[in-house]
Image (cartoon, rainbow, N blue to C red):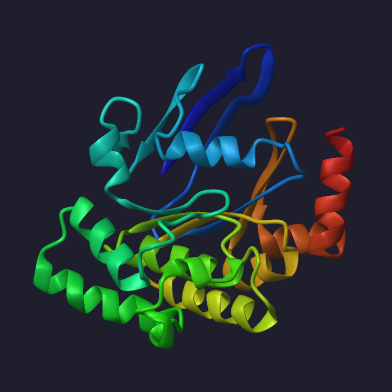
Amino acid sequence: MVIEDLTKYYDDFLALDEMSLKIMENEDVALLGPNGAGKTTTLKLLCGVISPSSGTAYIDGVNVFEERERAVSKLGVILETPEFYPFFTPEETLSYLGRLRGMKKRNLKSRIKKVIKLVKLEEWISVKIEKFSRGMKQRLAVAQALLHDPPILILDEPALGLDPRGMADVRNILKEARKEKTVFLASHQLGEVTQICDRAALIDRGKLLTYESIPNLKKKYKSFEQAYLELTEEGQ
């Protein structure tokens, strides 16, 4: 996954400022920064949800903005707070999304069972989503991101709204996924990030401040939290 001089203006507001980043296959990278730093804008651009003001991005060598459908087919995505049709069950939701992605019926059925088990929603598979808590919807969001077994996961706060048990479950799912997938996730939970990711990209006010391995940042700044605090303070 390659980002080249990616820039995004919303009218006169500069949300992302010539960001360049290269994430290798099966690398696990955290995108970190204060609220409004440009994290969600970056993820939306990579997913082709919005268009850049300038610059470009490639998913597995495919230009996101020239061949959007081909590029995003390689992604499993959670963006912002997930919402689903409340009158659907998890099984119906995943079946619908799988068909939209062109998954074959036999494979889709087995994948639904697998991902529902992974996120521990087996007892809720036939319950309407209107009865779900925010944390349960978040689990379902993780399930849909994994459904078509994509090589790359792009996740915006994947543990948002989860209790400690749920956060541990999602962490373990991502630890397992990282063995064979590239993971690029935005989060505010520094402790969780260090258990999932190898490297961190810190941004503030749309500018990339650093892109380094987490062990190197810990060594330079004595702790990962201190690295985050000092680097984002310098960006002010």
* Left or right: 179 as drawn, with respect to 133: left
- Quadrant (top left/top right/bottom left/bottom right) for the C terminus: top right
The picture quadrant where one finds residue 206 is top right
Q: In the depicted view, which residue is nearer to us: 24 or 193?
A: 193
* Left or right: 46 as drawn, with respect to 172: left
* Left or right: 103 as drawn, with respect to 179: left
Question: Percent x, y for residue 106?
Answer: 10, 73
Q: Residue furthest top?
A: 12
The picture quadrant where one finds residue 193 is bottom right
Q: In the depicted view, which residue is nearer to us: 176 or 44?
A: 44
Q: How many marks?
A: 0
- Quadrant (top left/top right/bottom left/bottom right) for the N terminus: top left
Question: Percent x, y for residue 210?
Answer: 70, 43
In the picture shown, does residue 81 fall above or below 132?
A: above
Q: Which residue is painted at 49% across and 54% down in the image?
A: 83
Q: Which residue is painted at 53% across and 80% down in the image?
A: 172
Q: In the depicted view, which residue is nearer to us: 30 or 125?
A: 125
